Image: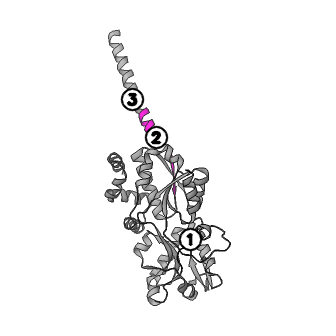
Amino acid sequence: MKKYMMPLVLVILIAGGVYFNNILKDDTKLADCGDITIANMNWASAQAIAEIDKIILTHGYNCNVELVPGDTVPTFTSMNEKGEPDVAPELWSNSLRIPLDVAKEEGRLIASDVFSQGGEEGWFIPEATLTANPELKTWEDVIARPDLFPNPENPDRGALVGCPAGWACQIINQNLYKAYGMEAKGWDLIDPGSSAGLDALINKAVNDGDNILSYYWAPTAILGKLPMYMLEPNVDHDKSEWETCTGVADCADPKVNAWGFSYVETVVTDNFAKEASVGLDYITNRSFGNATLNTLLAWMADNQATGEEAAIYYLQNNQDDWSGWVSKDVKKAVLAAL
């Protein structure tokens, strides 16, 4: 019996050693990536991208990913000052240019482009409004006609629909509203309350044949589906004024200005770069084509899909796009998890 017991014990020990060694290898692989927090912004494209990142980092790189609520300004402030969350997938950074550049220079944050053609921002009116009033081509053309864009709560005044609280564009719209003297010219600046509220106001106006003056941006489902005209500013973009006042909260004396090239970046903390280095190449390599994203967002709107559902749809139907961002093994693992 002793003759057989010793080999049996040896086999058990060897097998156990292999088993626990494999566990340790898996744990080491997980530890290489570790725990990651990703800001989940409250607009459709950012939600879809956050979920795409979560799926790829979780199943392709064995990261432990948590989505946390986020908005442009508070998320950047928290990342810059506290180093959390680890990733902001879609940060519209025009209003954050100076502090973001400082953070990059000092090594706290790393940024890469998320849209291959950049973003687009401005003031829009329905194309039907332009057809009926062909003289309304520029910002000042429209500012002179508050009567055409009545505020539903106060029809004697015009309404400029701006951005929800917490968005960087809220600050920009407030400063432009002030710079162009719109209050004295008969205008109110309206907070739509949320991304969904902003979309609902534009949808209703276009579908009902009403006029509306609203901030909006691209790539988005709205601009891919609804006939909207982007008004031309009457001045050129002043980068210095933008960085020191137009995009800065509580600027005392904003000057007239216009949106320039809209930088939209994925920003990660230095801790993510160090602790989750296996996923950094993916984050810095991935960039979405505007047309592709517009199509995804239109599908998302038509199907009332969540960010997670949109991410799965994208990964299943756009493999040629995202396979270039990852290795073959990562792609295989992601597809197997869908």
Q: Which residue is mark 1?
A: 163
Q: Nearer the viewer, mark 2 or mark 1?
A: 2
Residue kind at label 2, given as amino acid type: Asp
Above or below residue 120? Residue 62 is above
256 and 186: which one is in front? 256
Quarter-of-image position of residue 95 = bottom right
Identity of the amino acid at label 1?
Cys
- The residue where tag 2 is placed is 32
Q: Earlier in the sequence, mark 2 or mark 3?
A: 3
Horizontally, is 112 left or right of 156 in the view?
left
Q: CA distance from mark 2 to mark 1?
A: 39 Å
Q: Secondary structure at mark 3?
A: helix
Give the x, y percent position of residue 27: 45, 36
In this orientation, which residue lies closer to the viewer: 236 or 309? 236
Contact? badges 2 and 1 (CB < 8 Å) = no
Query: Does label 1 or label 3 sit earlier along the sequence?
Result: 3
Question: Tag 1, which secondary structure?
Answer: loop
Horizontal placement of 225 versus 159: left or right? left
Q: Residue at (41%, 66%) from the top-left corner? A: 117
Which one is earlier in the sequence, the residue at label 2 or at label 1?
2
Q: Amino acid at mark 3?
A: Tyr
User: Dot 2 surroundings within 10 Å: few (below 14), some, or many (20 or more)?
Assistant: some
Residue 190 percent coordinates (x, y) = 59, 76
Magenta highlight range: 24-40
Residue 39 appears in view: yes
- The residue under label 3 is 19
Q: Secondary structure at mark 2?
A: helix
Judge depth for marks 1 and 3 and give the one in front: 1
